[in-house]
């Protein structure tokens, strides 16, 4: 008998439950060190902190790209464990956008976005193409559907990457420094798409250095250092009245 992928969490309002996460890479200090956070459905959580604080590792653990050494991750009542069925179920529900665009250079924009829909969701080409056309309209790139990645700007490539992640109709979107590889003039066009997703109620966990975006769009902010949470709170409180001196020093440096 197959293992049931659902678990009773007792916290149905939370779509993401991460508790006491520990992740240690060989020869290094813990990237995550007793890290815990819960994310409500429809919430936008922004994670900030200095380089090497564990922000990207946290995101990669959420969708199973990295395996935690201890702790517990539950996404939409599915326990992320060694069971392959569970891991695949979570990856179908969690979209991720990386710093690098990770588009297939030999495939057109249409083919890049259609591919996962056909392989993961089992759509036929006509169904996938219809969804791709709608998503490209959403991210403002309808005219690029027949183009190839090397014909696009960095901002356009990242918007295609977002459309590709959205094509699987995920319940959660993870953004790992989605604008850090872009020229300054291209950052706004990507943030606009992310802002629209937030307004539409998408659950999002966003690692970013874009503090203006964080202040405007997020519901809560988590400040990490050395794999731990230094401070977490509602956005306005976090920026205007941080309680920790380390948080105040960090904000003084970047604002």
Image: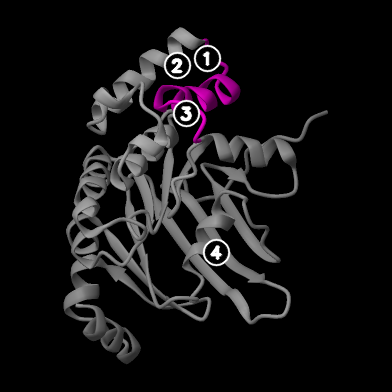
Range of residues picked out in magenta: 105-124
Q: Nearer the viewer, mark 3 or mark 4?
A: 3
Q: Is tag 4's residue or tag 1's residue first in the polypeptide sequence?
A: 4
Q: How far is disc 3 from disc 1 in space, using C-alphas?
A: 14 Å
User: In which quadrant is the N terminus drawn?
Assistant: top right
Residue 150: x and y in percent read 40, 38
Residue 122 in the figure: left or right of residue 83: left
Q: Which residue position is annotated with label 1?
A: 123
SS assignment at label 4:
helix
Mark 3 packing: few (<14 Cα in 10 Å), some, or many (20+)?
Answer: many
Residue under label 4:
57
Query: Distance between the Cα atoms at labels 4 and 2?
Result: 31 Å
Residue 49 in the image, given as x and y percentages of width and height = 39, 75
Mark closest to the chain's N terminus, 2 or 3: 3
Callout 4 touching callout 1 (CB < 8 Å) = no
For label 2, the residue is 128
Q: Neighbour class for label 4 at 10 Å: few (<14), some, many (≥20)?
A: some
Is residue 111 within the magenta segment? yes
Give the prevailing secondary structure in the magenta stretch: helix
Quick check: marks 1 and 2 in contact, CB under 8 Å?
yes
Most extreme residue toward the front is 151
Colour scheme of the rendered structure: one colour
Residue 112: assigned label: 3
Element under label 1? loop
Mark 3 → mark 4, Cα distance in angstroms: 26 Å
Going from the N terminus, do you reach mark 3 or mark 1 first? 3
User: Is residue 226 toward the left or the right of residue 154 in the image?
Assistant: right
Residue at the image position 22 percent from the left and 31 percent from the top: 140
Q: CA distance from mark 4 to mark 1?
A: 32 Å
């Amino acid at each position: 008998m197959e293992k049931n992928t659902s678990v009773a969490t007792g916290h149905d309002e939370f779509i993401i439950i991460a508790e006491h996460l520990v992740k240690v890479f060989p020869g290094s200090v813990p990237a995550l060190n007793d890290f815990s956070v819960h994310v409500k459905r429809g919430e936008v959580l922004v994670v900030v902190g200095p380089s090497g604080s564990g922000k990207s590792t946290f995101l990669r653990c959420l969708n199973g790209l990295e395996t935690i050494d201890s702790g517990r991750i539950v996404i939409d009542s599915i326990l992320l464990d060694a069971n392959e069925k569970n891991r695949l179920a979570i990856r179908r529900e969690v979209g991720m956008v990386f710093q690098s665009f990770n588009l297939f250079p030999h495939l057109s924009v249409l083919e890049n976005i259609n591919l996962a829909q056909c392989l993961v969701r089992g759509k036929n080409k006509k169904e996938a193409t219809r969804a791709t056309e709608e998503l490209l309209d959403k991210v403002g790139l309808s005219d690029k559907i027949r183009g190839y990645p090397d014909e696009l700007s960095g901002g356009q490539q990242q918007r295609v990457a977002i459309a590709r992640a959205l094509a699987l109709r995920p319940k959660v979107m993870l953004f790992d420094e989605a604008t850090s590889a872009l020229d300054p003039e291209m950052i706004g066009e990507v943030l606009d798409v992310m802002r629209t997703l937030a307004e539409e109620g998408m659950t999002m966990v966003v690692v970013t250095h874009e503090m203006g975006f964080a202040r405007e769009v997020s519901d809560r902010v988590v400040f990490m250092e050395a794999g731990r949470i230094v401070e977490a709170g509602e956005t306005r409180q976090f920026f205007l009245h941080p309680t920790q001196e380390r948080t105040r020093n960090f904000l003084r440096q970047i604002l």
